[in-house]
Image (cartoon, rainbow, N blue to C red):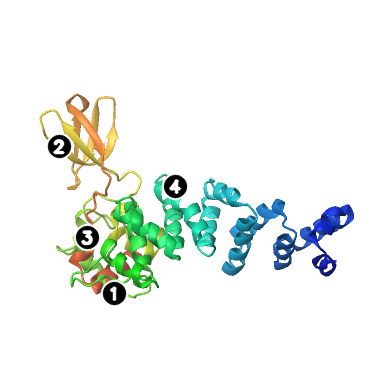
Amino acid sequence: MIEALSRLDPAQVNANPKLKDALQKVLDATRGTPRFVELAHKFQLKDQNRALLDFVVGSSDASACAERLRFVLENQGVELIRNALDGTNTVNAIKLAEACGNVSAMQAVALLGPLLADSTREPALRKRAVQSLAQSQEGSSLLLKLAKEDKLGADLKLTASAELNRSRWPNVKAEAAQVLPLPRGRNAQPLPPIAELARMTGNARRGAEVFASAQVACINCHQVDGVGIDFGPRLSEVGTKLAREAIYEAILNPSAGISFGYEGWQVQLKDGEEAIGIIVSETNDELAVKAQTGIVTRYPKSQITRRDRMNTSIMPAGLEQAMTLQDLVDLVEYLSSLKKASQ
């Protein structure tokens, strides 16, 4: 039946109810297979766009996903894709954003570009959009344009830098080196991209020494097993919570993903003084702010003129400049080793 249908002209099938019914039965039987795509494409079946998108978000075959998504785009399914990207299912949206990078460059820019400006969307989705855009010259140009205009979010710059500085287009790579340079270590040499760093093996024992060293001084803001200053997130189980790539990004770009409850605040007082830290509690009458020393001070609200949430992390940027490449790799090896006792 499949072979017979594939030889027929679409007009013949559409004009014959029995053939249309036969086609529907074949579509139901071949859903999710290359045959399904072949028939849907041949007969221009717009009502199958959703089934094709379901395949895209559920398959690990990148080539097949790109083929199906390309057909949906050609079959007037742009709004369907856009709605899926804007939906509440972040996992599906990320998979769809990945597939967009493997199809038409111009359509990918149109679909993924708006995600870069929407800071309310999941960071993982926005970073996937950056990675997909970087696969085309058009998408790369958009990323560079936003960076030059200071419209590329802080949480996206490290990802964009890593992608564009290894671009296969010389002009993109050259401009990225100026606009979005890779982080540099203590020897002033650019660090490898995070994906490459994550594959390196370090010395956890030496990493513990880097963690506590005066130059890097992670211990001045973080506790491990009760040792250190209780200011930033406790890191005793960070290796369980974060993958190596995420730990590298937290060090190299601390403003990319500020942990909930650790947002920095600037509090202005009537006497002209200023308090900077993390708000740990609040009542109708007072505000409790923890400073970087770990000390909590309570301020009467009657003495506060204003308070502003900081756009950047309290954790200082540029920490990698106090380390050699090996120091950084050893530090991440140590942090990755900090896991729950059962792991």
The residue at which mark 2 appears reads as 274
Of marks 3 and 1, the one in the foreground? 3
Dots 2, 4 in contact, CB < 8 A = no
Which numbered disc flags the more N-terminal residue, 4 or 3? 4
- What amino acid type is highlighted by mark number 4? Arg
The residue at which mark 1 appears reads as 203
Instruction: Give 340 or 235, whichever is nearer the viewer.
Output: 235
The percent coordinates of residue 239 (x first, y second) are 37, 62
The residue at which mark 4 appears reads as 121
The residue at which mark 3 appears reads as 318
Secondary element at image label 2: strand
The residues tagged by marks 3 and 1 sit, at their Cα atoms, a distance apart of: 22 Å
- What amino acid type is highlighted by mark number 1? Asn
- What amino acid type is highlighted by mark number 2? Glu
Above or below, 326 against 109 in this view is below
The residues tagged by marks 2 and 4 sit, at their Cα atoms, a distance apart of: 32 Å
Which numbered disc flags the more N-terminal residue, 2 or 4? 4
Which numbered disc flags the more N-terminal residue, 1 or 2? 1
